[in-house]
Image: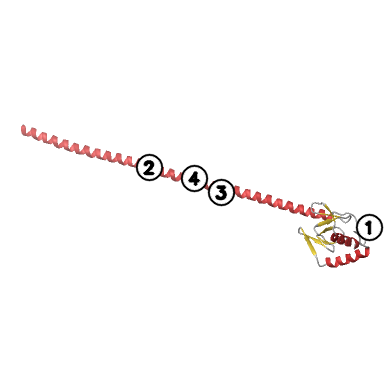
Amino acid sequence: MTISLAKAAGLAAATTLLGACSVGSYGGLSVGSAGYYDDGYYNDGYYGWYDDYYYPGTGHYVYDRNRKAHRWNARQQRYWLARRAALRDQRRIRANWNRWERREARREYRRDARRDARRDYRHDARQDARREARQEARQRARQQARQRARQQARQEARQEARREAIRDARREARRDNRRDARRDARREDRRERRRERRRDRDD
């Protein structure tokens, strides 16, 4: 399907007027009419993105995101023929994939940025997990050390109490033995005096 140069020029003028008020969007990049693209206004806007398809500037095919060719429809044909007709120097028309490559480069940059962000996030998460694990390990070690110290202190206290009890028992036994010995000695002394008095009387 073809149209005359006059009709193409008319369509180009209409497209230019409409494009001054309209900017579309494709994947976060400005696309649409009148040469307003992601890189600003282009006088050679006969190629680029429109209606979610890329037109390289020549031929009858537009390309989707996967660079699969599709024959243009009537609306795409009118749009791109008008853009080409608006170009002053028709000799400059040639297949051009620059805007595809720029957008692909930006997409790759964003993909790399997201990948780097995810990698940094995972790295930070692993660092945080290791730091928390070390902190928990230190806390457990301190708690265990305190528990062992308390247990050892209680054990030593019990042992000391037993030793003190044994010492007290021994002291008490020695004291009792001395008391018993003194009592026995006094008793024996009294007996001896009584025996002496009886001997004195008998004599």
- Asked whether the residues under the numbered discs 4 and 1 touch, taking CB atoms below 8 Å apart as contact, a structural biologist would say no
Element at label 4: helix
Q: Position of residue 31 (x, y in %)?
A: 80, 60
Viewer-side label of 3, 1: 1
Residue beneath the point at 68% across and 51% down: 118
Looking at the image, is mark 2 or mark 4 earlier in the sequence?
Answer: 4
Q: Nearer the viewer, residue 121 or 72?
A: 72
Q: Position of residue 90 (x, y in %)?
A: 93, 59
Q: Which residue is mark 2?
A: 160
Kind of residue sitting beneath label 1: Arg
Q: Amino acid under label 4?
A: Gln
Tell whether 144 sits left or right of 11. Answer: left
The residue pinned by badge 1 equals: 91
For disc 3, the neighbor class at 10 Å (few under 14, some 14 to 19, many from 20) is: few
> Which numbered marker is on residue 135?
3
Amino acid tagged 3: Gln
**Distance of label 4 from label 1 (alpha carbons):** 85 Å
The label shown at residue 122 is none
Find residue 152 and report its image quarter.
top left
Quick check: 7 above or below 104?
A: below
Calculate the distance from the C-alpha at mark 3 to the C-alpha at mark 4: 14 Å
Alpha-carbon span between mark 3 and mark 1: 72 Å
- Is the Cβ of the residue at disc 3 closer than 8 Å to that at disc 4? no
Estimate the x, y position of residue 88 in percent, counting from the top left.
Answer: 92, 62
Residue 45 visible within the image: no
For the residues labelled 1 and 2, the Cα–Cα distance comes to: 108 Å
Mark toward the start of the polypeptide (3 vs 1): 1
Q: Is residue 2 left or right of residue 113?
A: right
Q: Which mark is residue 144?
A: 4
